[in-house]
Image (cartoon, helix red, strand yellow):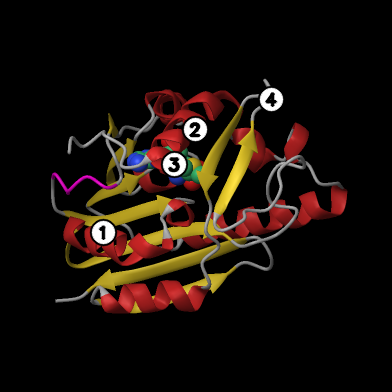
């Protein structure tokens, strides 16, 4: 399998979805348009988003870091400030946005189209993935976490931010996932199926443990996000 070849029908639909959504992706972070859920929920969202950013700033990333499924690079500037960062994503369209964001911040990083499931092409001190684990099928979580371990040098840091289930998290015209599958619409009315798995912290903790990670911490912000980190064991 080539590093950019998606694996199944949903996987390839997710790639097409995020490519088509690239120009409106940040509306979700910024609670614009269909992603606004009223003043109170939007304030809580911003509070949690700030908490997640502060948490990420506090993770001791250094040296060479790979960001998988990096999207429009929302978190990449934080990582690029303190590491030699390589960003990968399956969609060139989202990465174009990430490049613009990094350039605007005066930061440098390697950027490349690459499937998150591809075998590592280097050995790194850190791996970060934002809102990617929730796109990993439950049956393949162990496989993905083991892959992350193969990216890392011994003692290397893995950190992730992801979604908790909340009706005020997605677009107002999206229904919650059923059987971990969700239909997502874009502003132009097109729709796509994505896999969306709301992992409990305990499930992620166990998967990390099974893959030999140590110093595992999986926490939550007040409402919307999961924050996790772990170190590759011996
Ligand atoms: C929810 S977005 C997260 C983007 C970014 N990490 C963030 O936190 O804002 C999921 C990302 O996964 C990417 N993606 C989907 N399937 C992928 C795959 N098989 N390999 C790599 N990236 C993939 C999409 O293009 C999209 O940018």
Q: Is residue 136 found inside the magenta-colored segment of the image?
A: no
Question: Gap between marks 1 and 4, in whole Å?
Answer: 34 Å
Q: Classify mark 3: helix, strand or loop.
A: helix
Residue 24, horizontal then vertical, whole percent: 61, 28
Q: Which of marks 2 and 1 is nearer the N terminus?
A: 2
Residue at the image position 81 percent from the left and 46 percent from the top: 37
Q: Classify mark 2: helix, strand or loop.
A: helix
User: Residue 190 got which mark?
Assistant: none
Image position of 193 with respect to 21: above or below: below
User: Residue 18 got which mark?
Assistant: 2
Q: Earlier in the sequence, mark 1 or mark 4?
A: 1
Q: Name the residue under label 4.
A: 187
Q: Mark 1 points at which residue?
A: 148
User: How many numbered markers are drawn?
Assistant: 4
- Do labels 1 and 4 touch, CB within 8 Å? no
Residue 55, horizontal then vertical, whole percent: 51, 62
Q: Quick one: label 3, few (<14), some, or many (20+) residues within 10 Å?
A: some
Question: Gap between marks 2 and 3, in whole Å?
Answer: 12 Å
Label 2 CB sits under 8 Å from any ligand 1 atom = yes
Question: In screen coordinates, is 29 left or right of 13?
Answer: right
Q: Is residue 120 found inside the magenta-colored segment of the image?
A: yes
Q: Which of marks 1 and 3 is nearer the N terminus?
A: 3
Question: In screen coordinates, is 104 left or right of 156?
Answer: right
């Amino acid at each position: 399998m080539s590093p950019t070849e998606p694996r199944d029908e949903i996987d390839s639909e997710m790639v097409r979805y995020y490519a088509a959504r690239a120009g409106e992706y940040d509306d979700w972070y910024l609670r614009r348009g269909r992603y606004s859920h009223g003043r109170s929920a939007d304030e809580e969202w911003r509070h949690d988003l700030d908490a997640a950013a502060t948490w990420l700033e506090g993770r001791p990333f250094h040296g060479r870091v790979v960001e998988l499924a990096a999207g429009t690079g929302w978190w990449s500037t934080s990582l690029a400030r303190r590491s030699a960062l390589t960003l990968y994503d399956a969609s060139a369209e989202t990465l174009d946005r990430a490049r613009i964001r990094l350039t605007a911040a005066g930061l440098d990083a390697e950027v490349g189209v690459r499937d998150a499931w591809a075998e590592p092409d280097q050995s790194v001190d850190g791996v970060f993935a934002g809102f990617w684990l929730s796109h990993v099928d439950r049956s393949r979580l162990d496989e993905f976490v083991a892959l992350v371990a193969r990216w890392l040098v011994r003692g290397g840091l893995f950190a992730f931010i992801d979604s908790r289930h909340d009706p005020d998290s997605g677009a107002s015209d999206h229904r919650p996932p059923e059987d971990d599958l969700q239909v997502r619409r874009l502003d132009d009315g097109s729709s796509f199926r994505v896999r969306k798995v709301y992992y409990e912290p305990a499930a992620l903790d166990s998967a990390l443990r099974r893959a030999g990670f140590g110093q595992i911490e999986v926490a939550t912000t007040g409402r919307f996000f999961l924050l996790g980190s772990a170190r590759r064991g011996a």
